[in-house]
Amino acid sequence: MSQSDILVQLRKELGAIIDPDFGVSFEELQAIHTLEVKQDTSVELYLEFVPPLHYVAKGFDEQCKAIITKHFPNAEVMIYVREKELPANPVLPQVQNLIAVASGKGGVGKSTVAANLAIALAHTGAKVGLLDADIYGPSVPTMFGLSGEQMKAEKKEDGKIYGYPFEQYGVSVASIGFVMGRDQAAILRGPMLAGYFTTLVDQIYWGELDYLIFDLPPGTGDIQLTMTQRIPLSGAVVVTTPQEISLADVRRSISMFRKVNVNILGIVENMSYFIPPDMPEKRYDIFGAGGGETVAKEVGTRLLGQIPIIMKIRENADDGLPFVADPESGNAVHFYKDIAKNMVAEVRKKNRDKIASPGLTITL
């Protein structure tokens, strides 16, 4: 078989690899940019994919190397991967993906989910920011061991004053709790709330980020509406518990996001069940069972995952060391890591749509 025939066969086999997030081949995605063989001593493959790639890049690399080595066993294999360019984000141009974590009501563990998802993403090597916009009850300072800290600020060349997020557990962290008194939120009303949020977004210097996670207040009020008017979100993750009273609020929250054209990336069911550590064969559905999956099917979105009641999750949050950041948490961190992976898969799907049909974004 001539080298040209081998190249045709090699390109065919590489083109048949499936992108797991889309369920389609490299050929259909037009992922193979260039394939070069240099005198049987080296093979260079240039690939281009829809971002973000933190969960899929390693698998792509391994599959491609295995196929190339089969045809050129003695050649040096070099694979170069780049991300397709997304339409420019006019509000936070240095941030690739903006994700809101929301809930229809308080008390469902939304902030705990947001914090642990942010750290799970950072563990993939991504640059991650977490903005605690829950003005009524900013809990991120406590969960990250930063209670009482004040955000440092600096005047830049453009004349604006910018605040700098704290770096903790691999995540850039900013919170309304760093710039206002502990009890100050109790006296804020609609326009003031929106103003505080706008200041947070406009005057924090994040630098380049792969993901910026917004921990929103519960409900469907001024903060949520201000965000959806001003920020081109990649999508929203809605946190709930299995009981019907929480699910009714989830439906309202999803309805609000859809009315303002924000994609729903999926639902996280928190406090799904309890397994006693000393009786692992027992399972108790304290808040009911299956509610998250039911409402996900009802509204046509994905159940990203279920998180059981684990005492250590609450203890870690109170102690300023989120569960995923604690090396003693063991294999149980997979609950958050699996949800983060599923969420990123949904982000990639939305980004593919953006690249295929970029539109005009109007911000208010």
Image (cartoon, rainbow, N blue to C red):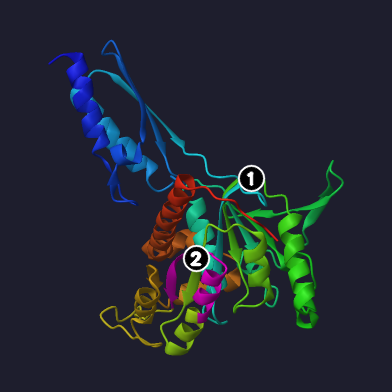
Which residue is located at x 69 percent, y 55 percent?
Answer: 166
> Can you give x and y, in whole percent of width and height, for residue 91 in the image?
67, 52
Which portion, as a residue range, is magenta?
Answer: 252-270
Q: Is residue 362 left or right of residue 81?
A: right
Question: Can you tell which of label 1 and label 2 is closer to the viewer?
Answer: 1
Residue designated by label 1 = 94
Q: Which mark is residue 40?
A: none
Which residue is located at x 70 percent, y 54 percent?
Answer: 165
Label 1 packing within 10 angstroms: few (<14), some (14-19), many (20+): some
Residue designated by label 2 = 323
Q: CA distance from mark 1 to mark 2?
A: 29 Å
Does the rendering let one see residue 185? Answer: yes
Q: Secondary structure at mark 2?
A: helix
The amino acid at mark 2 is Phe
142 w.r.t. 79: above or below? below
Q: Is residue 162 left or right of residue 75?
A: right
The one nearer the camera, 262 or 205, is 262
> Can you give x and y, in whole percent of width and height, for residue 300 in the image?
38, 71
Which residue is located at x 29 percent, y 47 percent?
Answer: 24
